[in-house]
Amino acid sequence: MSWSKLLKIVGVLAFFSYQTHAQTISKQGFLQFQSNFAEAEQQLDARLADTPSDTPASIELNLQKSQLYMLYQRADLLKPLLDEIQQRIFAQNDAVVQSHWYLLSGIQFYLVGKYAQADERFLLSLELLKSNNRPLENAYLENFILMYQAVNRVYLQQYEAALAELTAVYKVAEKNSWPIIQARSLVFMGEVNYALKNYEQALEYYHNAYNTYPENALIYRAETLMFEAQMVNIVGERSVAFTQLEQAMNVFIEQQDDTRLANAYLLKSYFYSKVPDDTQALEWIAKSVKKREQLGNAIEIANAYVHYSSQLGTNGQMPLALQYAKKAADLAEVHEDIAGQWDSYGNYADLLNQAGDYQQAFHYMQLSERALLKKARLDITSQTATLNAKFNLSREQLKSEFLDKQGQLLEERNTLLNEQLLMEQRQQRHQNWVLMVLSAALVFFLIMCAVIYRLYIKNKLLASRDPLTSLHNRRSVLMLGEQVLHSSDRYQFAVSVLMLDIDSFKAVNDRFGHETGDRVIQYVANICLAAIRKPDYVGRVGGEEFLLVLPHTDEKAALLLAKRLCEQVVAADKKSIEQVKQVTVSIGIATKNIQSDQPHNSDPHKDLNQLIREADAALYIAKEKGRNQVQVYHTDLDLKDHAVNLDASTPNMLRTLPD
C-alpha cells in the first residue's frame, strides 16, 4: 500500500477579495488564518451572519470559508458548502470567481479519491480563467490550478506528465518569487518520487520545501515535516523520524487539524510496527481509525482499516482483524483508487488465508490481482499515449516538409503516406497488445514466485522451530551445535554447553494444569532468548529442558551467563504466569577448551554428544544439591569451589514439590 495515499497532499487555495483578485493574490500568496480551525470558522460564521447572502461580500466570505476547509482538508465540510453557494457563484458574471469554484470542487473530488472528476473540474477552471483575457493578473491562480492538476495526475498513473508540469510550475514560481507555490511544487514533486519509490529523492524535495515555506505557514511546514519523517524512517535514523513526527503532531493538535492528525497517528503506528512494538502500533492505529471515522472520508477510512486490520492480525485478534479488513475491501469498491483496491483486497485475502478460509482468500486475491493488472494497464496506456503523441507530432512535421518540397506529387505521395501510417498504427497496436500481455504475465509470475517463496520460508521455519516456544527444536539445535563444534576444531575457539531444567515442573503441571505449565515454559524460553548473543543458539530439547550452545565462550563466561539466567528467572515479571508465585531453574555447564589451563576439562577433541552428557551430569548434581543453582562439570564429578546456590537467601515456593 502506498503510504503517500495515507498522507495525501492537499493544500490551501489562493482566494482573495472578490473585487481585487489579482492584486491580493500576488501580494499575499495565500490567505492566512491567525487562529486555530474552530476559532477561524466561528469568526467567518459571525461575519457571514452579519452580511446579506446575495452580496459580493457574502460570496467572498464563503470562498474564504471554503479555503479554510481546504487548508484543514475537511472534504466532509467542503462539499455541502460548495453545493450551497454554487447557484450564487454562477449567477455572477465573473469568470474568475467561477474558476475558483471549479478549482475547489476539483480538489474536493481529489480528496475523496474521484480523480477523473477532479481532472474535469481542473480543466473547466483553467478554461474559465483563460476566457477572462487577463493573463498577467491571473498568472498566480493559473499556476495554482496547474499545480493541483499535476498532482492529481499521479493518481491517474501519469507520473511523467505530473513531474514535467510540476517542474514547469516551480520554475515560474521561483522566477516570480511565489514562495507558497514554489514550496508546494517541491512537496508534490516529492509525492511523485515517493510513488515511484525514489525515497532519497523524495526526502530531498520535502526538506527543500520545508526551508522554502514562510515561517508563518505553520500547518504547511508541519505537514512537510511529517512527510520528511516518513522518508527518514525509510532511509535514515528511526529516532530522528520519531522526533520530527512528534513536532508535527504538536502543531496539528494546537491548530485542531484533525485530518493531518489522523495521518500522523497512522504514521506513528507504522513507525512502532517497525521497532517492533505491536502494542504501541495497535494503540496509535486505533486512534487514527477513530479520527478518520469521525471525518467521514471513505477513501481515508478504507486505508486506515487496512492497516488497522493488519495490525490486529499481528496482535492475534483475528476475528476483529477480519471484520475491519472486510470493511476496507467494501469501501475500496466505491472509489477510483486502484492501488487502494489492490491493497485492501490483498490484505483481506491474507487474513482470510491465516484464518483458514481459503475459498474466500482465493476470491479476494483474484480481486487484488485484477486491480494490480488494471493499474499496470493504465501505466502502459499512459506511456503508449505519450509515445503515440510524439509519433504523430513527428509524422506531421515530416508531412509538412514533404508537401513543401513535392507539391506536384501531393495526391500520390499523400496516398502512400496514409497507407504507411495505417500499417505503422496496426503494428503499433499489435506491439501494445503484446507488451500488455507480457507485462500481465510478468506481474502474475512475480506474484506467484513471491507466494511460493513465502510458503517455502514458512515451512522451513516450522520444520526447525519448537511450536510452543518458537525456539529451535531438538533436531535443529543439535545440528547447529555440531556445526559450532566443527568450527571450533577448525578455528580453535572454546565452546560451552548449558543444560537448563525448570525445577519442580511436574508439580506445576499437577497443581495448576498443563496450560499454566506451557506458559512457564514460554516464560523461561523468553528469558533465555533475551539473554544470549547473536551467535549463540538455544533450543528446547525436552519437556522442560533447554540446551544452550555458546561459541567463543570459556567456562568463566558460561558460568556468568548461567548465574544471570537463574537470577532473571526468579526476578523477572511474572504477569503471564500469575498463578505460579516463583519459578527457578537448575543449570549444568560443560566446556570444550582448545588451550585449557584446567586439567579436568582439557580434552580439546570433545564432540557435542560428550559435552551434552557432561552438562547433563552437572545438571543432575545441581538438582541433587537443592536446585536453583549452577554446577560445572569436571571429570570426577566433584563440584568446583565457585559453584553457587542462588537460593540461599530466598525461600523456594516450589521446593516441597517433586520434579
Image (cartoon, rainbow, N blue to C red):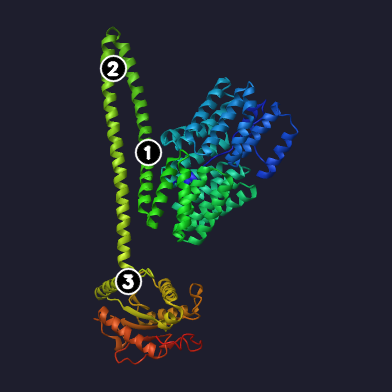
Residue 133 shown left or right of residue 492 in the figure: right
The quadrant holding residue 551 is bottom left
Q: Residue beneath label 2, please? A: 418
Residue 552 visible in the displayed image = no
Secondary structure of the residue carrying tag 3 is loop
Residue 397 x/y as whole percent: 34, 19
Whichever of callouts 1 and 3 sits on the residue coming sooner in the sequence is 1
Give the residue at x 57% y 49%: 291
Secondary structure of the residue carrying tag 1 is helix
Please give the count of numbered marks on the rendered protein. Answer: 3
Q: Residue beneath label 3, please? A: 473
Q: Residue beneath label 1, please? A: 374
- Camera-near label (2 vs 1) is 1
Residue 265 x/y as whole percent: 54, 52
Labels 2 and 1 touching (C-beta < 8 A)? no
Kind of residue at disc 1 = Lys
In the rendered view, tell whether residue 588 sits above or below residue 448: below
Q: CA distance from mark 1 to mark 3?
A: 45 Å
Residue sticking out furthest to the right:
50
Residue in front for this viewpoint, 517 or 270: 517
Kind of residue at disc 3 = Asn
The quadrant holding residue 60 is top right
Secondary structure of the residue carrying tag 2 is helix
Give the residue at x 32% y 82%: 591
The quadrant holding residue 70 is top right
In the rendered view, tell whether residue 300 sits above or below residue 117: below
Whichever of callouts 2 and 1 sits on the residue coming sooner in the sequence is 1
In the rendered view, tell whether residue 576 sits above or below residue 296: below
